[in-house]
């Protein structure tokens, strides 16, 4: 069974819940007022960066895949029993 101190702490926590919830939502509203949507120019610029980066990584992985594929094929051919 809970002691009287634990009981009082639980009651205080439950009683403070509405006030903490109100404070939380007020803080959320305050922070959301600071949020701004990006301009069309910013969206185009970041999209361009993302697309270029994707193509660079695709090229990089294609080259690495090609090198590994031919390296493994060369190893298999070198140790193939004739």
Image (cartoon, helix red, strand yellow):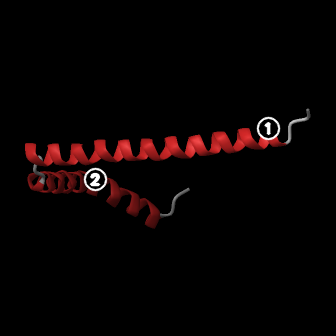
| Residue 81 pos. (x, y %) | 91, 35
Element under label 2?
Answer: helix
Quadrant where the C terminus sits is: top right
Q: Residue at x 10, y 50 (%)?
A: 36
User: Quarter of the image holding residue 19?
Assistant: bottom left
Disc 2 packing (10 Å; few <14; some 14–19; many ≥20): few
User: Quarter of the image holding residue 12?
Assistant: bottom left
| Residue 10 pos. (x, y %) | 40, 58
Q: From this viewpoint, which residue is outermost toward the bottom?
A: 5
Disc 1 packing (10 Å; few <14; some 14–19; many ≥20): few
CB within 8 Å, label 2 to label 1 = no
| Residue 2 pos. (x, y %) | 52, 59
Is 37 in front, or is 75? 75
> In the picture shown, does residue 36 fall above or below 12?
above
Element under label 1?
Answer: helix
Residue that badge 2 annotates: 17
Q: For the residues carrying marks 2 and 1, which lies nearer the camera in this image?
A: 1
Quadrant where the N terminus sits is: bottom right
Marker disc for residue 30: none
> In the picture shown, does residue 71 fall above or below 20?
above
Residue that badge 1 annotates: 77
Q: From this viewpoint, which residue is outermost toward the front?
A: 82
Is 22 in front, or is 11? 22
User: Quarter of the image holding residue 44?
Assistant: top left
Q: Give the side of residue 10 with respect to residue 20, left or right.
A: right
Is 21 in front, or is 69? 69
Q: Residue at x 64, y 39 (%)?
A: 69
Q: Residue at x 26, y 48 (%)?
A: 49
Nearer-N-terminus badge (2/1): 2
């Amino acid at each position: 069974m809970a002691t009287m101190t634990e009981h009082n702490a639980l009651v205080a926590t439950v009683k403070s819940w509405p006030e903490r919830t109100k404070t939380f939502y007020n803080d959320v509203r305050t922070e959301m007022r600071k949020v701004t949507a990006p301009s069309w120019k910013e969206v185009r610029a970041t999209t361009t960066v993302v697309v270029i980066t994707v193509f660079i990584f695709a090229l990089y992985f294609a080259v690495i895949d090609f090198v590994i594929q031919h390296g493994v094929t060369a190893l298999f051919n070198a140790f193939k029993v004739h």
